[in-house]
Amino acid sequence: MSHTPPRTSTVIGCTLLVIALGVGVTSCGSDGNPLSAAPYDAADQIAFNGPSGDGRKADPDKPLEVTTEDSDGRITDVTARDAAGRYVAGELSADGTRWHSTSPLAANARYTVRVSTEDEDGAPGRKVLTFDTSRPTTKKLTVTFGPRAGKYGVGQPITAELSSPVKDGKQRAIVESALKVDSIPAVKGAWHWVDDKKLHYRPMEYWPTHATVQARSNLEGIKISDRLRGGAAKPLTITTGDRVVAVTDASTHQMTVYRNGEVIRQIPVTTGKPGYDTRNGVKVVLAKEGTVRMTSASIGASDFYDLTVHHSVRVTNSGEYVHAAPWSTGSQGYANVSHGCTGMSPGNAAWFYDTISEGDIVEVVNSGGDTMAPFGNGFGDWNLPWKKWRTGSALVGGTPDGPSPAERARLRPQNV
């Protein structure tokens, strides 16, 4: 088989380039063994009917093909890559008479093709070809990575927002295979399609502490569909800090805060009362918002309140916070009296606010509430087991696992 070096995945190829490789004159070394000979120049035996220095450019939507028409010779290896170092995947027939591309060429790119041949006596031949592909005339798909560059907790997912929806499974595979996430130290991770325009990436477990995580796209110029090609994307780099995890047990009314696996504080708390039960599950800190006005009108609560709340840490889009609750200090550690938030004393809230960071983990257990939805209400990504997370990858063959309309309807706001 042809040796195909690592390359970016994409779809189909360039103008039909047929390279007819004839049989060269046997070139032997001084010892008469053809295998000891230096490769001969196969230029006189190659017919190349693609662009050949006349100013024309290859159509990137057509496959690249290399053939030999002489039954006494065969192709032994073909490599094709562009100036950015991206290889084109290909397959070589068992008899060595034909090689064709199985991944697409990029538009507006320069390619170098190296062909190795062998004649009937085993003498090696070599030929190097170069050609340019034409510019795309289709719409560009751009990618915006998130969050913003900076330092985060170990629970922070990487997001990719697409400029246009991608619904087809094969097209999703092209897009996903070009979105790269690397970390130092290295960990196993995967993309998950949240919907037609958004993907999330997370490791199998939380990111390592003090890691550097980089996201980039290799989509530029790659054909996704007849009317859609990849555009440029700005890469993203984030770093992680310590592993800070705050676990609230709603049945014992206690929050235990861990740093790198060690308990650093236990805090009496109150969580949601019946009818406003705090959601169970893992939540990623979305923002440290400080002072926030919270009202009953925002969630349609029957009992009126309008409060200015300090040291507010948001954990859902619908309004669930961890915050100071001086009005409920008598219940903290004993009863659940809030409208869904986790409340604590002003002193403990100030400490928590100074300790926690965006991307850190806040987990709730033993509440009467539903489990935090994976998507649509913040980052509930870690509530999906790894096996189920992987089903949301187009490369695995799964389907998106976002919330259904009924699930979205249950995402009512919570406050205080």
Image: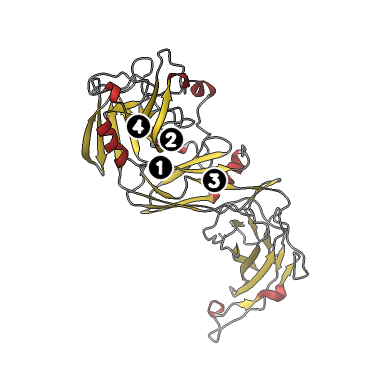
Q: Are marks 2 and 1 in contact (CB under 8 Å)?
A: yes
Question: Which amino acid is tagged 2?
Answer: Phe
Relative to 230, 296 lies left or right? left
Judging depth in this view, the residue of 387 and 403 nearest the camera is: 403
Q: Is residue 410 above or below residue 317?
A: above
Give the CA separation, mark 2 to mark 1: 8 Å
Q: CA distance from mark 4 to mark 3?
A: 41 Å
Q: Are marks 2 and 3 in contact (CB under 8 Å)?
A: no
Left/right placement of residue 134 relative to residue 258 reads right
Any mark on residue 156, and which? 1
Q: Name the quadrant containing residue 89.
A: bottom right
* Rendered location of residue 336, percent (x, y): 29, 19
Which residue, given by chain and number where applicable, does mark 3 sit on?
Answer: 176
| Disc 2 target residue | 379
Q: Look at the picture and state if 117 lies above or below 167.
A: below
Quadrant in which the N terminus appears: bottom right
Task: State yes or no: discs 4 and 3 in contact (Cβ < 8 Å).
Answer: no
Report the Cα–Cα distance between label 2 and label 4.
Answer: 23 Å
User: Disc 4 designates what residue?
Assistant: 310
- Of the numbered discs 1 and 3, the one sitting upstream in the chain is 1
Amino acid bearing label 1: Gln
- 10 Å crowding of disc 2: few (<14), some (14-19), many (20+): many
Of pointers 2 and 4, the one earlier in the residue sequence = 4
Q: Disc 4 residue type?
A: His
Q: Earlier in the sequence, mark 2 or mark 1?
A: 1
User: Label 1, label 4: how many angstroms apart (C-alpha)?
Assistant: 24 Å
Q: Are marks 2 and 4 in contact (CB under 8 Å)?
A: no
Q: Is residue 130 above or below residue 294?
A: below
Q: Give the mark, 2 or 3, whose residue is nearer the N terminus.
A: 3
* Residue type, numbered disc 3: Glu
Residue 72 seen in this snapshot: no
